[in-house]
Image (cartoon, grey):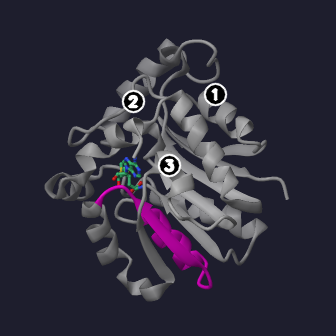
Amino acid sequence: MTAQGERAAAAWRDTDFARDWARGDSFRDLLDFPRRMAAAIVAGDDPAPATIVDVGAGPGAVLEVFLRRFPGARGIWTDASCAMLDLAQEKLAPFGDRVEYRIADMTDLDGAGLPDAADVITTSRAAHHLDRTGLAGFYQAAARRLAPGGWLVNLDHIGPASQAGPPATAGLDDAWDKRLRAARKEFGVSPDGPKHHHNYPLTSVRDHLDAFAAAGITDVEVPWRAFYTCLFMGRTPA
Ligand SMILES: C[S@@+](CC[C@H](N)C(=O)[O-])C[C@H]1O[C@@H](n2cnc3c(N)ncnc32)[C@H](O)[C@@H]1O
């Protein structure tokens, strides 16, 4: 496991921590919409993807949405945490042997034994544990594992560009940062919860778009955003 992967994974390996986080996940309801939206966008392009890999999948909420939407697909759940594996096996049990479970480090996807031509790779709220270089490396490794025309989907927390410093320029300035932080309190959504490693400053929208481009994925959009959480979707060249 890489040093960055180890730092990101450390807290999640604790069973009580993982269960507390999953129980108190303040984003549970909010994120159902972008998860289903991501699956619908993929479906419009590829109505029957065969292989869907979820990275840093945790309890498996994203994979669950995709497996429901695509009844012919098999899912590969991956995460660094055995505590999360237990939670995912409970949640994804209804899908039986359509799901394969792998303990894997998201910072070493090439060493994870994943298929080399997945139709869809999803990840959610995991890549914000990585710094800008780590994020670029992650997108590159994911792009290598996708079939031509495959989709890379990341539903992730971002930081305002003003925190990230140059050359990140797209995103929020300080005034918008303050507005969003204040308004977010009314909605009870915050990535805080039980303490775990976040890589500060969080990568910005611009960092994500740059990392997609560096991975050779230029057909990219941010089809959904709420406060500091964005759905990034990119399709590899066919
Ligand atoms: C905030 S949870 C998100 C879980 C799930 N993707 C979701 O959105 O509900 C972050 C997940 O990233 C996983 N994670 C942290 N570091 C990792 C690493 N180096 N490799 C793979 N997974 C990792 C954690 O175990 C945890 O399940």
**How much space separates mark 1 and mark 2, taking CA atoms?**
16 Å
> Which type of secondary structure does the marked residue at label 3 adopt?
helix
Indicate the position of residue 167 as horizontal and vertical percent values: 64, 15
Task: Pick whichever of labels 1 and 2 is earlier in the sequence.
Answer: 2
> Which type of secondary structure does the marked residue at label 2 adopt?
loop
Q: Is residue 41 left or right of residue 99?
A: right
Up/down of 171 relative to 233, above or below? above
Q: For residue 206, which numbered disc appears in the image?
A: 1
Q: Is residue 112 left or right of residue 119?
A: left
Q: Is residue 215 left or right of residue 64?
A: right
Question: For the residue marked with disc 3, what is the amino acid?
Answer: Asp
Indicate the position of residue 51 as horizontal and vertical percent values: 62, 73
Judge by depth and name the residue closer to the eye, 204 or 76: 76
Label 2 crowd bin: few (<14), some (14–19), many (20+), radius 10 Å: some
Which quadrant of the structure image shows residue 168?
top right
What is the span of residues highlighted in magenta in the rendered image?
61-81
Q: Residue at x 14, y 56 (%)?
A: 16
Indicate the position of residue 237 as horizontal and vertical percent values: 83, 53
Up/down of 77 relative to 175, above or below? below
Q: For residue 80, which numbered disc appears in the image?
A: none
The residue to which callout 2 is attached is 199
